[in-house]
């Protein structure tokens, strides 16, 4: 577990859950702060440096989405963000576009939470190193002119944890895919395995979170993410 004294702000209007999460995380080495809603959380985040924000989505006064929107207006980089929720009526596309790295369903177990935090705090050099041992049925294959042109046309946009791609395949959320994207102008190729995190069938676009990057494309993909430092985990475009 990559806590190393990492700080975490837990935001939930259910006080019992605040106590449970605080106990779990405190025992795992985190420095824990709490808030009962987004407005109180914003005060904490303005006063302290926090490594991870763990927030419910639906809350009175200020919900989790409004909280993250406010964070993105601040000059300082936001913390890593994980949402937990017991509801499904929200836009996954918007949430990942705002910078949220994981969506966890309630009721939530301690191992699932700690695994998500471990991945959230992982250094870029440690990410996406292990391929899936299982064959993946669906493959997204794109042949594009160049990175700049692809982004302008919303055919491919890179985020901090994956990409948005133009795709008319019948994809399903949470399904694994192979991703192969070639950029003729730069002579670059992206070869990856990923998980579909949102689908817009009408616009023929999908958001894919990276699970594995082939060694030959890791250097340029990681360098581009680091140089651009995108706030979106998966872009909306």
Image: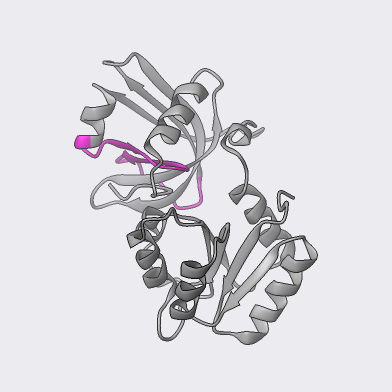
What is the x, y in percent for residue 182? 35, 21
Answer with left or right where residue 168 lies relative to residue 124.
Answer: left
Does residue 146 sit above or below 128 in this rendering?
above
- The answer, for residue 51, to whether it is visible in the render is yes
Residue 141, quarter of the rendered image: top left
What is the x, y in percent for residue 213? 53, 29
Residue 73, quarter of the rendered image: bottom left
Residue displayed at 50% across by 51% down: 174
Q: Nearer the viewer, residue 37 or 191?
A: 37
Magenta segment, prevailing SS (helix, strand or loop):
loop
What is the x, y in percent for residue 52? 57, 59
Residue displayed at 59% across by 85% down: 14
Does residue 71 sit above or below 229 in this rendering?
below
What is the x, y in percent for residue 171? 40, 46
- The answer, for residue 108, to whether it is visible in the render is no
Q: Is residue 158 magenta?
A: yes
User: How is the protein colored in the picture?
Assistant: one colour
Does residue 186 sit above or below 83 in this rendering?
above
Residue displayed at 43% across by 86% down: 60
Q: Nearer the viewer, residue 54 or 188?
A: 54
Please state the extent of the stretch shown in magenta in the rendering. 152-175
Q: How many marks?
A: 0
Q: Nearer the viewer, residue 17 or 138?
A: 17
Q: Is residue 204 magenta?
A: no
């Amino acid at each position: 577990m990559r806590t190393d004294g990492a700080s975490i702000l837990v935001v939930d209007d259910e006080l019992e859950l605040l106590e449970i999460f605080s106990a779990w995380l405190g025992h795992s080495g985190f420095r824990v702060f709490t808030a009962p809603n987004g407005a109180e959380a914003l005060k904490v985040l303005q006063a302290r440096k926090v490594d991870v924000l763990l927030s419910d989505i639906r809350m009175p006064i200020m919900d989790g989405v409004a909280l993250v929107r406010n964070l993105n207006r601040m000059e300082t980089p936001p913390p890593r963000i994980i949402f937990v929720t017991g509801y499904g009526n929200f836009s996954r596309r918007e949430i990942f576009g705002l910078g949220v790295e994981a969506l966890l369903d309630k009721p939530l177990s301690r191992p699932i939470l700690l695994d998500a935090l471990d991945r959230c705090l992982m250094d870029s050099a440690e990410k996406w190193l292990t391929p899936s041992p299982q064959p993946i049925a669906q493959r997204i294959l794109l042949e594009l002119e160049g990175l700049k042109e692809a982004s302008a046309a919303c055919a491919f946009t890179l985020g901090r944890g994956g990409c948005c791609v133009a795709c008319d395949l019948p994809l399903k959320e949470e399904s694994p895919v192979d991703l192969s994207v070639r950029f003729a102008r730069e002579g670059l190729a992206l070869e990856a395995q990923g998980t579909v995190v949102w689908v817009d069938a009408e616009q023929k676009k999908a958001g894919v979170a990276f699970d594995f990057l082939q060694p030959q494309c890791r250097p340029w993909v990681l360098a581009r993410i680091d140089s651009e430092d995108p706030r979106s985990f998966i872009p909306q475009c």
